[in-house]
Image (cartoon, helix red, strand yellow):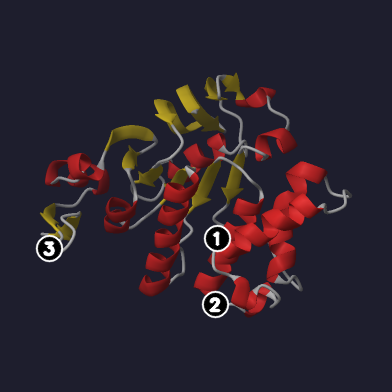
Amino acid sequence: MFEVQSASFEISGKTLLSPIDFTFGEGKIYGLIGHNGSGKSTLLKLLAQQQPVSNGRITLDGRPLDQWKPREFARHVAYLPQQLPSADNLTCRELIGFGRYPWHGLLGRMSRHDQRQIDRAIELTHTEAFADRLVDTLSGGERQRVWLAMLLAQGSRYLLLDEPLAALDIAHQVEVLALVRKLCQELGLGVIIVLHDVNMAARYCDHLVALHSGSLLAEGEPSTLMNGVNLEAIYGIPMQVMNHPGTACPIAVLQ
């Protein structure tokens, strides 16, 4: 499991994340919510080894992150940044194949096992129909599914996703989150995801972690955290919470 122990982050004398204590386990989806600049992406980058903690520490399986070598760490944790790298002139299958890098290195040859992992990732994400197309020719939702397939090919236990719904329409948002939910349940993955839409977070996440101005403000299951008092503290505007008539999932609406 990930254990965040009084971890904080500062840059140029400015505190972006105040000391936080929290534990992330496998088999659950954790939604990081809060206003812009609340520290969601900063926390995710610390977990992903993209930035070192300024104080405190973060451990994976009881071992501090700075003691993990990058390729070894990538066999356990896969990270999808908000700004995706360029995939010019790559087919979907080629991009998904990059997920095997932590296992054989940059110049290593693909083994049969690697190919099986790639095929499995394509099957799990239902990307067979466009596996041989160029990534840049896909729709936003299709492209996100291919990037998720690359993370699955990596064979990691944790997926760290920074705003994977950005620029997607509502249909593709639901498609991507439903797929993440399905993968979490079937594979027992731990998923930590940054989301702006609190209703999407409440519907698809098992546990919500609310940040405000770099501090941990509240955390808990959606049914517990989603109330008017908490949401106004998180977002600074009054909201009313009701249950979805079909699923009983809490829904927040502006008053």
Q: What kind of element bears circle 1? A: helix
In this rendering, the answer to whether 161 lies above or below 52 is below
Q: Are marks 1 and 2 in contact (CB under 8 Å)?
A: no
| Mark 3 vs mark 2: in front | 3
Mark 3 neighbour class, 10 Å CA radius: few under 14, some 14 to 19, many 20 or more? few
Q: Which of marks 1 and 3 is nearer the N terminus?
A: 1
Q: How far apart in space, not on screen, are marks 1 and 2 (Cα)?
A: 19 Å
The kind of residue tagged 1 is Leu
| Residue 113 in sight here | yes
Q: How far apart are marks 1 and 3 (CA)?
A: 31 Å
Is 48 positioned to the left or the right of 245 in the image?
Answer: right
- Left or right side of 94 for 66: left
Mark 2 element type: loop
Q: Describe residue 54's horizontal placement relative to residue 213 as left or right.
A: right
- Please name which of the two marks, 1 or 3, marks the residue nearer to the observer: 1
Query: Tag 2: residue type?
Result: Ser
Q: Are marks 1 and 3 in contact (CB under 8 Å)?
A: no
Q: What residue type is labelled 3?
A: Pro
Q: Report which residue position mark 3 lands on.
A: 245
Residue 158 position in % (x across, y down): 54, 41
In the rendered image, which quarter is residue 103 located in? top right
Mark 3 or 2 closer to N-term? Answer: 2
Q: In this view, does 211 lie above or below 138?
A: above
Measuring 56% from the left and 40% from the top, which residue is drawn there? Answer: 157
First in sequence: mark 1 or mark 2? 1
CA neighbours of label 1 inside 10 A, class few (<14), some (14 to 19), many (20+): some
**Dot 1 corresponds to which residue?**
124
Where residue 163 sits: x, y (%)? 46, 55
Whether residue 84 is visible, yes or no, is: no
Residue with the mark numbered 2: 139
